[in-house]
Structures are given as structure tokens and as C-alpha cells.
Amino acid sequence: MNNRNAFYKIGTIGMILTAALHVLLAIIIGPSVHTSFAIVYPSWVAFLVIGTAQMAKEKKEK
């Protein structure tokens, strides 16, 4: 994963950690945590999209 874009890394790690925390807190606290996590996921998706687009652009230029 060393040749991956920084935005892609941030998005991937953020999505994995958020999903794990979401599952853990949903089990401990209950379904009331779903609304707070619904706000966070789009930010990680944005990082993934930006990183993927930049990697595609770099690959196209080569």
C-alpha cells in the first residue's frame, strides 16, 4: 500500500476504524448511535473518491 495516494490511505483507514467503532458502540450502547455515525461515513467516502481519482489521473499520465 506504499504506492497509494495519501487521500486513499486516509479514507480506507478512516472507514475501517469508523466501521469497527460503529459496530462496537452499537452493540454496547444500542441503535441510537447510528445517526451520529451516518454523518461521518460520507467524509471517508470523499477521501476515497479523491484518492482514487488522483491515482487514476497519475496512472493515465504514465
Image (cartoon, rainbow, N blue to C red):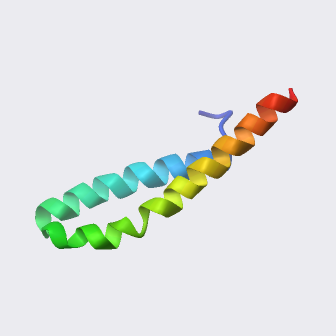
Residue 60 in percent (x, y) is at 81, 30
Residue beneath the point at 43% across and 60% down: 41
Residue 42 in percent (x, y) is at 48, 61
Q: How many marks?
A: 0
Image height of 13 relative to 1, above or below: below
Q: Is residue 26 left or right of residue 15?
A: left
Residue beneath the point at 60% across and 46% down: 8
Residue beneath the point at 38% across and 54% down: 17
Quadrant of residue 36 within the rendered picture: bottom left
**Quarter that holds the C terminus:** top right
Which of the two residues, 6 or 46, is positioned nearer the viewer here?
A: 46
Which of the two residues, 36 or 28, is positioned nearer the viewer here?
A: 36
Q: Is residue 50 left or right of residue 25?
A: right
Which of the two residues, 29 or 56, is positioned nearer the viewer here?
A: 56
Quadrant of residue 22 within the rendered picture: bottom left
Residue beneath the point at 48% across and 49% down: 13
Q: Is residue 14 left or right of residue 10?
A: left
Residue 46 in percent (x, y) is at 57, 57
Q: Is residue 53 left or right of residue 29?
A: right
The single residue placed furthest to the top in the displayed view is: 62
Image height of 61 relative to 39, above or below: above
**Quarter that holds the N terminus:** top right
Image height of 4 relative to 40, above or below: above
